[in-house]
Amino acid sequence: MFIPLTLGMIVIIVVSLLVYIDQKSTYEKIDIYKWTKENGDFYFSVPYYIWQRNKKIRIREIYSQNTILEFQGERFLITHYGGEFPQIKGNPLFEREARYWGEPLTILQTYRNEHLTINQYGSGVINVQLNNTEINNEIINIQEYISGESDLTFDEKEMLLNFIENIYKDKGMRKEEVRNAYDIFLKYEPLLSLSTNIVSLIRNFL
């Protein structure tokens, strides 16, 4: 016996499908936008639909505090999460945006060698950039050492893995985070031997 679908049933089916798609999506890359007001104030936003709970979680993970953003050659630091708002353009019933506030970054000093470039910004943020495959291999060796049998504590391993991940993602770090990683490198001789380039360059900032 055929049961005709009502409008309400169709809506439930469609929303359920959209929720399922959201749950199965990894959202490895999510675009963020910069909006500037006439008075020069600005903020950043990431759009999503009300049924995209998984995307909303990923937005907060990807764009956390101290994340560095680049727009038209300028760099900005996310200082805090501002909350959820209806989208400026779109359907206010279904569309939302996560808003962030930040500040422009001005480089105070730069140190570089053939393997790494480190920029230090006025807000106390340090940004470490890879220059070639040799330093990339050095980092791989560090990761293998951390993952293998070593004397590092769990917290020390987590700290160094976060430090390396920030380098890979070209993500800014507070000076305290860099100093903590540096101290761990110095504490363990095998680790120090594997991180010669990183340690020698970071020393200029601490």
Image: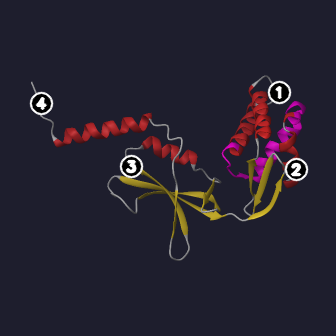
Q: Is residue 36 above or below residue 150?
A: below
Q: Residue beneath label 4, please?
A: 3
In reply to whether residue 98 is colored magenta, the answer given is no
* Colour setup of the view: secondary structure
**Residue 74 badge:** none
Of mark 1 and mark 3, the one earlier in the sequence is 3
Q: Which residue is mark 1?
A: 151
Give the distance between the C-alpha atoms of the residues marked 4 and 1, in whole angstroms. 66 Å
Farthest residue to the top: give it.
Answer: 149
Q: Is residue 32 left or right of residue 75?
A: left
Q: Tell me which numbered mark, 4 or 1, is placed earlier along the sequence.
A: 4
Q: CA distance from mark 1 to mark 2?
A: 23 Å
Residue at image point 43% right, 36% down: 23
Mark 2 crowd level (few <14, some 14–19, many ≥20, 10 Å Cα) = few
Identified at 73% across, 42% down, the residue is: 163
Q: Which residues are magenta?
A: 168-193
Q: Secondary structure at mark 4?
A: loop
Label 1, label 3: how many angstroms apart (C-alpha)? Answer: 46 Å
Q: Identify which residue is drawn at 80% across, 36% down.
A: 138
Give the label, 1 or 3, closer to the camera: 3
Q: Position of residue 22 (x, y in %)?
A: 41, 39
Disc on res. 49: 3
Give the Cα separation between the discs numbered 4 and 2. Answer: 73 Å
**88 shown above or below 198:** below
Foreground residue among 175 and 105: 105
Q: Residues within 10 Å of mark 4 (few under 14, many from 20)?
A: few
- The mark closer to the camera, 4 or 1, is 4
Name the secondary structure under disc 2: helix
Q: Hey, what amino acid is under mark 3?
A: Tyr
Circle 2 residue: 203
Q: Earlier in the sequence, mark 1 or mark 2?
A: 1
